[in-house]
Image (cartoon, rainbow, N blue to C red):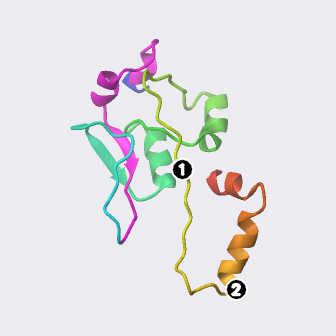
């Protein structure tokens, strides 16, 4: 198992900084790239998407935060463990945007789906 798995107390920044983090690369095209939840100088393995992040963490190539719906079954089966940290990662705000003046049938379809209560939960769920 991963070395952090054996730590029985909440993990400190120093604990986390000593190990490789798996992080999804920022995909923004016209904005400055953001870094969220990484520590300065930390060894980081950047991956293109959440599925790759999940796969790499499951393979033991690093650690990181994953959405609870993605790991629910893995935690129940003992393939992942949930660790407490001294400084929890703040909740992320999910924002969706689209260009003004381009509100065709596809955007209307998306807006309709987003009004449904289970849409975001299903979007965050794995596979």
Q: Quadrant of residue 27?
A: bottom left
Residue 127 in view of the camera = no
Instruction: Using a 10 Å C-alpha cutoff, classify the residue at mark 2 as few (fewer than 14 neighbours), some (14 to 19) or many (20 or more).
Output: few
The residue to which callout 1 is attached is 93
Q: Position of residue 22 (x, y in %)?
A: 38, 43
- Residue 35 % position (x, y): 34, 49
Residue interval drawn in magenta: 4-29
Q: Is residue 25 rendered magenta in the image?
A: yes
Question: Residue at position x 39%, y 40% from top?
Answer: 37
101 or 16, nearer to the observer? 101
Split into 4 quadrants, where in the image is the C terminus?
bottom right
Relative to 83, say whether 107 is above or below.
Answer: below
Q: Quadrant of residue 29?
A: bottom left
- Residue pictured at 31% horizontal, 62% vertical: 32
Q: Residue furthest front?
A: 100
Residue 105, numbered circle: 2
Q: Quadrant of the N terminus?
A: top left
Q: Are marks 1 and 2 in contact (CB under 8 Å)?
A: no
Disc with the residue nearer the chain's start (1 vs 2): 1
Tell me where residue 46 appears, x and y as whole percent.
34, 51
Q: Please tell me whether residue 76 is drawn above or below residue 32 in the rendered image.
A: above
Q: Position of residue 25 (x, y in %)?
A: 37, 56
Callout 2: helix, strand or loop? Answer: helix
């Amino acid at each position: 198992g991963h070395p952090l798995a054996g730590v029985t107390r909440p993990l400190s920044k120093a604990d986390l900084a000593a190990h490789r983090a798996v992080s999804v690369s920022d995909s923004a095209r016209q904005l400055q790239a953001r870094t969220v939840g990484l520590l300065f100088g930390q060894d980081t393995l950047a991956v293109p998407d959440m599925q790759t992040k999940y796969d790499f963490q499951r393979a033991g190539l690093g650690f990181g935060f994953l959405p609870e719906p993605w790991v629910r079954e893995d935690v129940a089966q003992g393939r992942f463990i949930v660790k407490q940290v001294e400084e929890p990662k703040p909740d992320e705000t999910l924002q969706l945007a689209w260009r003004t003046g381009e509100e065709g049938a596809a955007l209307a379809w998306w807006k309709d789906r987003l009004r449904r209560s289970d849409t975001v939960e299903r979007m965050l769920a794995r596979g």
